[in-house]
Image (cartoon, rainbow, N blue to C red):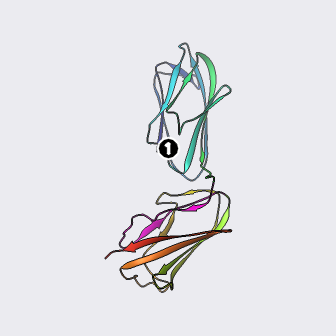
Amino acid sequence: MLMLMLRKAAFLIDDSIVNRLSRDIKKDNKNVVWKMNVESQKDNVELTRDSSSIPLEKDLSIQCESSVIDMRTQKSIKIPSGKHVVVITLKDRIPQKTSLLQNYPNPFNPDTWIPYQLSSAEAVVISIYDVSGRLVRRLDLGNKEAGMYVSRDRSAHWDGRNEVGEHAASGIYFYSIKAGKYSATGKMLILK
């Protein structure tokens, strides 16, 4: 959940006077654009965000007049006096390069999440191998849009079972990703 707050002045929003405004923007897989009419008699009214509230998979920007501020790097924006339209945009973050990240938790029992990021839309397959190189499980994730798949609800999930549904034994395993022309391998450990 993302919390944005306007403070230090009264605002006219949809014909209502507001002295303090809090807005929850629920985290989901969709982009959010929120337009707000702000009217203030005071100069340098501050719009701030909770410092830990931007999901890793998202970018947050705020536009007031011709200024666009990246709220991942800045915590607040000052709004001059007068009437303004403030546009808040929360959108999927597109990484510069495709990469496979370390599974979490590691070591794990009984299941783990395998995060990755895509710089372009690709068909994604993650394969899990034992130390002798035998395929244990193949996770065909299908076509995925460019973006970050790093949170528990978006990353690949391995339940610790092989292709026939049996629990994998304790030990070292390797996981590899194939996404278009990109491939990489990581190492993980099951401890029971």
Secondary element type, mark 1: loop
Q: Main secondary structure of the magenta part?
A: loop
* Lateral position of residue 17 relative to residue 36, left or right: left
**Magenta span includes 107:** yes
Determine the residue located farthest toward the top in the rendered image: 41
Q: Amino acid at mark 1?
A: Ile
* Residue 16 % position (x, y): 54, 23
6 up-or-down from 183: above or below: above
Q: Quadrant of residue 65?
A: top right
Pick the front one: 100 or 44: 100
* Residue 133 % position (x, y): 51, 84
Pick the front one: 34 or 109: 109
Q: Quadrant of residue 110?
A: bottom left
Q: What residue lies at 44% left-to-right and 80% top-to-bottom?
A: 161
Residue marked by disc 1: 54
122 up-or-down from 62: above or below: below
Q: What residue lies at 54% left-to-right and 15% top-to-bottom?
A: 43
Q: What residue lies at 48% left-to-right and 57% top-to-bottom?
A: 151
165 up-or-down from 120: above or below: below
Q: Which residues are magenta?
A: 97-119
- Quarter holding the C terminus is bottom left
* Residue 140 % position (x, y): 59, 74
* Residue 36 % position (x, y): 60, 30
* Number of other residues with Cα within 10 Å of mark 1, as a class: few under 14, some 14 to 19, many 20 or more: some
